[in-house]
Every structure is written in C-alpha cells, then in structure tokens.
C-alpha cells in the first residue's frame, strides 16, 4: 500500500475515535498480545523475491521481484471476505500473476508456493522481537499471539523457535473468527484468564489490530515500522517502545 493510502487509512481510524484521552496506556497491563505478519515476522527477502524464484522454475523469467511485490500488495489491498483458506490464497496469487503466465498459478505452481511459505527460511524475525518479548516476560507479563493466518502458522512458529515464548497462540483459521471480530480477542482474553482491559495488543493493521482490539476492550498500539504513517500518540516505530511505555527494561 502506498504512503498516501496508508496515512489516509490511519487518519480515518483515528478521526473516528472518540476522546483521544481514552487512548492512554495504563499501568494495569498484565499481558501483551501480538499480531504476527509485519509485526513479528516478514517474508524474506520479500514476497516478490519468493514468488519470482518459484515462477522462474516454471519458465516465468521476465518479471522482477519488485513488480511482483507491487502486484501482490495491490491484490492484498483489494481482498474481500478473506478467510485465510488455501483457496483464498490461490486467488491472491492468481491476481498477482494476472497476465504474466499462460495459465493461472492455481493450475500450475501454486502448490509449490504454498509449501515455500511453510518453511522458516522464507521468513525473517524482526531484530527487535526477541529482546522485547524477553523483557516483557521478565517483567512478569503474559504473552500471546492473535493472528489472522492459516493452518501453516502454528508449525511455522515452532520451526522459527517463537512458540515457546508465548502463553497462548490464537489463530483465526483454528477458532473461526478473524480480526477485527471481537470474538477472537475475547477468546484470547479468556484463555489468558485476564480482563480485556488488562491486555495490550500490538499490530500493524489500523482496522484489525488497533481498532479491533479497542472495540473488544483491549488497550492497543499501532506498529508502523516505516515512516509512511505520521507520528501519533499511539503509533510506535519499534517493539522496544512497548517496554518504554510499560516501564520495563529492554
């Protein structure tokens, strides 16, 4: 998504909120929950590089990783009623390669792409993740994951060595609810055995993470790792800022 659209989306979310004073993060926090994609991990070196690598093996050589990343971002931004099923992902991939292949990837190399993203070498853990979650855990806080993802996430987190750091892992495909649906947040609170107001949720989506969590009674912060979103009281650039806000050592 381009810079102007990202900023416009966040501005719309913030302008629809009631009293900005309600956004103060309190010291009653007893747990921190995290989104996954764009928050804890990201495709490596990029979605486009992985798509291009697999496509190249099937004779598609005249498209750059950068162009495929642009096309994927466009297809992802235009998605509707995305349930994180294999079929949903096949449609995204087909839209990404529209006009570039003789046949849609869903009929040719989609299965290979699906398997590729199942491997840890297709992902990078952001460098601020482990120091932050270790600091939060040392501060006595429970940790959770609340993610819109498919059935590949839980084994992927195991392979990346991340699962062991979290008390609860809530995945949309497993529970039948997707952020920003308050049901997935309420389920996370129930499994953590905590009141929603004592949980801080952090993610990179204005609607799914920031607003969705707030609507479910959580406190929340929006993670914007790039400068495409202007500084706001509840925008953080790096996860270590959580520790600064909650007063724990990083």
Image: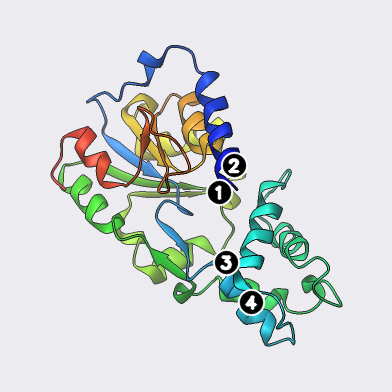
Given contact means CB atoms under 8 Å apart, are the residues at marks 3 and 4 in contact? no
Q: Residue at x 70, y 62 (%)?
A: 86
Q: Residue at x 52, y 67 (%)?
A: 46
Does 151 sit left or right of 195 as displayed? Answer: right
Earlier sequence position, callout 3 versus callout 2: 3
Tell me the residue that label 1 is attached to: 148
User: For mark 2, what is the residue?
Assistant: 178
Say what secondary structure mark 2 lies in.
Answer: loop
Label 1–label 2 contact, CB within 8 A: yes
| Disc nearer the start of the sequence (3/4) | 3
**Upstream in sequence: badge 1 or badge 3:** 3
Residue pointed to by mark 3: 47
Residue furthest out toward the left = 249
Residue occupied by mark 4: 52
Sort mark 1 into few (<14), some (14-19) or many (20+) by Cα contacts within 10 Å: many
Q: Disc 1 or 2, which lies upstream in sequence?
A: 1
Measuring 69% from the left and 80% from the top, which residue is drawn there? 55
């Amino acid at each position: 998504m381009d810079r102007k659209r990202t900023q416009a989306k966040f501005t719309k979310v913030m302008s629809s909120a009631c009293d900005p004073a309600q956004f103060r993060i309190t010291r009653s926090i007893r747990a921190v929950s995290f989104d996954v994609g764009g928050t804890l991990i990201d495709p490596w070196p990029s979605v486009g590089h992985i798509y291009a690598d697999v496509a190249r093996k099937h004779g598609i050589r005249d498209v750059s990783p950068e162009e495929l990343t642009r096309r994927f971002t466009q297809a992802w931004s235009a998605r509707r009623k995305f349930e994180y099923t294999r079929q949903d992902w096949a449609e995204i991939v087909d839209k990404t390669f529209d006009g570039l292949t003789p046949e849609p990837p869903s009929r040719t190399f989609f299965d290979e792409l699906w398997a590729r993203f199942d491997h840890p070498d297709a992902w990078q853990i952001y460098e601020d993740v482990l120091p932050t979650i270790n600091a939060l855990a040392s501060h006595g806080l429970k940790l959770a994951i609340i993610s819109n993802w498919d059935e590949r996430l839980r084994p992927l987190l195991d392979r990346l060595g991340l699962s062991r750091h979290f008390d609860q892992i809530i995945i949309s495909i497993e529970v039948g609810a997707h952020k920003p649906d308050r049901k997935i947040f309420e389920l996370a609170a129930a499994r953590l055995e905590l009141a929603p107001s004592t949980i801080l949720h952090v993610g990179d989506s204005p609607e799914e993470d920031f607003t969705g969590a707030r609507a479910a009674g959580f406190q929340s912060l929006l993670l914007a790792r790039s400068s495409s979103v202007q500084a706001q009281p509840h925008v953080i650039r790096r996860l270590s800022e959580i520790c600064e806000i909650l007063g724990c050592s990083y």
